[in-house]
């Protein structure tokens, strides 16, 4: 790796660490910087302010970092795997399945603590069906995309079916949640998320060379000795389960999986050995910034984080498209 | 023969006119209720026998058929019942469905969505005038008013409690001063910790809830709120509501179909939760 690239990655890591500390310090509930630092250094102290920092703000910051990194790396993998610049973390039906699971939990009156699990199993079901369909077609890209998209439609039809049969109050909350929410309703979810996301990211990192070869086209990849079916299967399952875990923890947060890989490629070129770690870092920083904005702009009210990622991300990406030379998009 | 036909048509016309105004003949009136609160109110007025159709969310009556859900009434079904009146509530029933029913030539009565006790009472009296039970309605309204006054007078003697209303957990949504839920706090001598916010159902910061330190938390099972959510708040040991064990779960079904009597019952329940000493010893009516 070139020295310059290493330096950029290092700089990104420094920015992320600084961002985490800054995000914990930023909050309009009136705890001063001095007090915040005191409570951060004394986690066992007592008091309301300690609870605000350690039970609400800090877990939320960590969750936004994890989810941002995971969504961005899913995006990288899907864009490379499907060789499609429009692919993102939810392309293969993960969000549809999760929405179905969540709404089902709501009408079964189980949405309390079980909501994330239902959402995760919903996306798991969707992944399973896509897998079955795609495996019949030897994991061709079109089978994966079509399977994923059709399943998304199927699940959204089922969600609408449940909606039209149930009380509005029961499902309304789930709709809000699906729009993306990083605020912590139970620490258990935050504690479990890293166990899903970190190993999955680790596995994806082991496949960066194969991702490079896959972008050359399947024929060439085969000739260069890549076991296509196994590689695609592993990447698909890994990335989708990770996206499912993200939806379970934080709802559906758009744009991160779509735009971050493009930005990373703009900086580092096409080599996934750099693009993947860079996307992880940029995605984490991006969602951290967006969520910090979402919880502070109209305090004591909160904005849905998806609104911020959509606006920031949309404007940023349009200007990025505008400035990109012809043919350099992917 | 001609003379007989004329008399027949005059009789029919007379019956039609008598049904369109207030109903005293009773048997001839057919009502379709598209809102659970209206259905319940008809039961209170002993007028459920007029019901020809109700939604699947309404209290069911043996001679009333189900005409669909709140949001999706089946137009053909409603029309085929040939109702004299269809009762709807703006905000509960979709405006499009209301317009469609009107365009079919059906006599649609649109009630205002109840946001306050006064709204509930006004709607109730309006309904009673249509079904010809105004005396009964005024009797109920007077009794409810009297009891609400007694409860709120008793509650006002206590220190006002700062209350947080949770109506959705993920994301955290509360009901602020302009909401219907807030009426219960108003009459039970309590203060909503988010009464300064103009939005009816705002999404609020958890940090701010802790900072404002409510003395009681009411979990209302509207969205994804469940009884076990108590445990989440109990992890914040320094919260006044936790220290005094003042976190309660209330079933929203009663609040979502407001009638004068259900309002009184809910108010009584919430007042007893917030001021338990009122329910011991002295009767809260």
Image (spheres, helix red, strand yellow):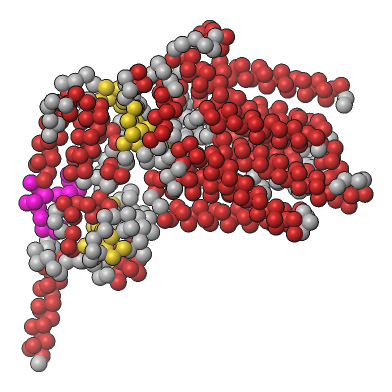
Query: In percent of the image, x 41 and y 24: which residue is there?
Result: B234
Residue pictured at 42% horizontal, 45% vertical = A109
User: Would you say A302 lies left or right of B275 here?
Assistant: right
Q: Which residues are magenta?
A: B120-139
Q: Is residue A141 magenta?
A: no
Residue located 78% across and 23% down the image: A8
Q: Nearer the viewer, residue B232 or B21?
A: B232
Q: Position of residue A153 (x, y in %)?
A: 59, 55
* Quadrant housing the N terminus of chain A: top right
Q: Is residue A233 visible?
A: yes
Question: For the C terminus of chain A, which image quadrant?
Answer: top right
**Vertical side of B152 occupied by B31: above or below:** below
Residue A108 screen position, x and y as percent: 44, 48
Q: Which of the 4 image quadrants contains residue B210?
A: top left
At x 58%, y 57%, the residue is: A154
**B169 relative to A290 in the view: left or right:** left
Residue placed farthest to the right in the image? A223
Residue B3 in which image quadrant:
bottom left
Q: Nearer the viewer, residue B277 or B213?
A: B277
- Image quadrant assignment for residue B49: bottom left
Magenta segment's dominant SS is helix
């Amino acid at each position: 790796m070139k020295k310059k690239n290493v330096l950029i990655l290092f700089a990104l890591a420094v920015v992320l660490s600084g961002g985490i500390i800054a995000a914990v310090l930023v909050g309009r509930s009136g705890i001063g910087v001095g007090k915040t630092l005191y409570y951060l250094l004394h986690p066992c102290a007592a008091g309301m302010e300690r609870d605000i920092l350690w039970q609400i703000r800090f877990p939320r910051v960590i969750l936004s970092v994890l989810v941002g990194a995971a969504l961005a790396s899913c995006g990288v993998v899907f864009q490379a795997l499907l060789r499609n610049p429009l692919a993102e973390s939810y392309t293969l039906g993960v969000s549809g399945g999760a929405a179905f699971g969540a709404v089902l939990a709501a009408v079964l009156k189980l949405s309390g603590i079980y909501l994330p699990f239902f959402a995760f199993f919903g996306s798991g079901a969707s992944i399973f069906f896509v897998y079955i369909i795609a495996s019949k077609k030897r994991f061709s890209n079109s089978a994966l995309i079509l399977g994923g998209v059709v399943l998304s439609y199927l699940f959204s039809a089922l969600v609408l079916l449940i909606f039209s049969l149930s009380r509005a109050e029961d499902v309304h909350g789930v709709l809000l949640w699906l729009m993306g929410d990083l605020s912590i309703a139970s620490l258990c979810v935050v504690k479990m998320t890293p166990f899903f996301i970190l190993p999955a990211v680790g596995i994806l990192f082991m496949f960066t060379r194969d991702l490079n070869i896959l972008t050359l086209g399947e024929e060439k990849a085969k000739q260069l000795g890549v076991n296509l079916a196994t590689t695609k299967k592993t990447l698909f399952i890994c990335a989708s389960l990770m996206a499912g875990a993200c939806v379970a923890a934080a709802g559906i947060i758009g744009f991160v999986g779509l735009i971050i890989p493009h930005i990373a490629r703009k900086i580092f070129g096409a080599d996934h050995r750099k693009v993947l770690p860079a996307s992880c870092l940029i995605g984490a920083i991006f969602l951290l910034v967006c969520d910090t904005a979402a919880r502070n702009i109209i305090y004591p009210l909160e904005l849905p984080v998806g609104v911020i990622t959509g606006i920031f991300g949309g404007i940023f990406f349009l200007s990025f498209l505008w400035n990109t030379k012809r043919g350099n998009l992917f | 023969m001609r003379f007989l036909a004329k008399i027949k048509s005059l009789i029919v016309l007379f019956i039609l006119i008598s049904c369109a105004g207030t109903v005293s003949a009773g048997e001839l009136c057919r009502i379709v209720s598209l809102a659970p609160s209206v259905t319940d109110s008809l039961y209170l007025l002993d007028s459920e026998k007029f019901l020809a159709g109700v939604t699947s969310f309404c209290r069911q009556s043996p001679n009333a058929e189900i005409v669909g859900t709140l949001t999706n009434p089946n137009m053909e079904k409603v029309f085929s019942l040939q109702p004299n009146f269809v009762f709807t509530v703006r905000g509960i029933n979709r405006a499009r469905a209301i317009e469609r029913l009107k365009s079919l030539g059906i006599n649609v009565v649109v009630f205002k969505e109840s946001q306050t006790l006064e709204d509930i009472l006004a709607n109730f009296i309006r309904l009673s005038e249509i079904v010809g039970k105004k005396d009964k309605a005024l009797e109920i309204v007077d009794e409810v008013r009297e009891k609400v006054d007694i409860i709120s007078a008793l509650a006002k003697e206590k220190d006002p409690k700062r209350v947080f209303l949770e109506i959705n957990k993920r994301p955290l949504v509360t009901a602020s001063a302009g909401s219907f839920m807030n009426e219960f706090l108003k009459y039970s001598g309590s203060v909503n910790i988010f009464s300064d916010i103009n939005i009816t159902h705002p999404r609020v910061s958890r940090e701010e809830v802790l900072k404002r330190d409510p003395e009681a938390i009411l979990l209302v099972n509207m969205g994804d709120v469940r009884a076990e959510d108590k445990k989440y708040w109990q992890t914040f040991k320094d919260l006044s509501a936790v220290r005094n064990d003042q976190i309660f779960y209330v079933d929203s079904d009663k609040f979502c179909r407001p009638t004068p009597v259900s309002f009184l019952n809910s108010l009584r329940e919430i007042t007893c939760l917030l001021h338990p000493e009122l329910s011991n010893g002295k009767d809260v009516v």
